[in-house]
Amino acid sequence: MIAILKHGTTQAQTEHLIAWLRNMDLDVHMSQGQEVTILGLVGDTSRVDMELLGSLDIVDSVKRVSEPFKQANRKFHPCDTVVEAGGARIGGGHFGVIAGPCSVESEEQIIEVATAVKAAGATILRGGAFKPRTSPYAFQGMKDKGIELLMKAKKATGLPVITEIMNIRALDLFEDVDIIQVGARNMQNYDLLQELGKTNKPIMLKRGLANTLQELLMSAEYIMSEGNENVILCERGIRSFETYTRNTLDLSAVPVLHELTHLPVVVDPSHGTGKAKLVPPMAAAAVAAGADGIMIEVHNNPSCALCDGAQSLTPAQFSDLSLTIQKIREAVR
């Protein structure tokens, strides 16, 4: 349920109404814009008398929110959310360029790639320390050592860092990580999401391989319901009958999510296609579709990469892509 307050309502009147609503054991989330203030009510709203609430002098209208996701809903929060991490911003007109290797392999490799992607325009460094792999025999990442190397790359370049968490028991290792990534396989790991919701870290939530957009938003709701509103959504492709590409990159998700939610939406064409040659055109299409950022895998020697070399761009290719993205953003502005 949302209550839209009349223009000119004072802060004292708003606080008095919020106190009254909280006495009904409701969580109240206030979204204050230039023209309108919206109170989002979460909880058992059946105890709220809509006619009584709507009759108050300061209330313009009262509406029920039919969608199961509440705090992630644009009806609760009409203005775009801007997520800040280490000086970088994503959402609300701020475009994030996230780039780096699928896996951290050595200090030389991560610093070389970090330096190259920053020079080409990246605003955030990605790099996998813990790697979820289909095969138990595949490279699983350098784990805590990988995070140490990411921190060295962060110190060397000044770029904020994003890396994936696999298990909440490793959370202490992520103290200096700027954005915690929840991968597609963990999108519905609700215990993990709730624990991350108790942190103040920005969380990037990747869409699962076979999940609907509503399920993605409900997973975001798990994080936000615990108090952490710094959530970034990521479209990274879904599984379909097509086998030529690794996944089917659903770019229609970008405008649909922007209609449904205030949270920023990032696109990962590297995992979405699985082929380096397809990454630039799909990244360009994502920008044209209105994405708030892109996430690109970049490796200094893709043919020798320990993980996902086939979908990784070289630093030179990423530099060319960055110029293309800049031109498209200027064209669609």
Image: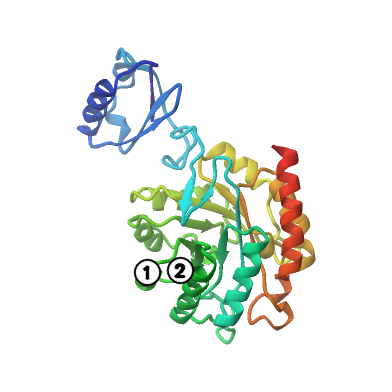
The residue at 41%/47% (across/down) is: 229
Q: Which residue is the extreme one toward the left?
A: 23
The residue at 47%/79% (across/down) is: 143
Q: Residues within 10 Å of mark 2 (few under 14, many from 20)?
A: many
Q: Is residue 138 left or right of residue 181?
A: right
The residue at 62%/41% (across/down) is: 256
> On the rendered image, what quadrant is the C terminus found in?
top right
Q: Is residue 191 left or right of residue 135?
A: left
Q: Residues within 10 Å of mark 1 (few under 14, many from 20)?
A: some
Q: Which mark is residue 171?
A: 1
- Is 55 above or below relative to 23? above
Residue type indicated by callout 2: Ile
Residue type indicated by callout 1: Leu
Give the quadrant of residue 323.
bottom right
Along the line of sight, the residue nearer the viewer: 15 or 256: 15
- As helix, strand or loop, the secondary structure at mark 2 comes to loop
Q: Position of residue 199 (x, y in %)?
A: 34, 57
Mark 2 touches mark 1? (CB < 8 Å): yes
Q: Which residue is the extreme one toward the bottom?
A: 137
- Is 168 above or below relative to 68? below
Q: Which residue is mark 2?
A: 165
Along the line of sight, the residue nearer the viewer: 139 or 54: 139
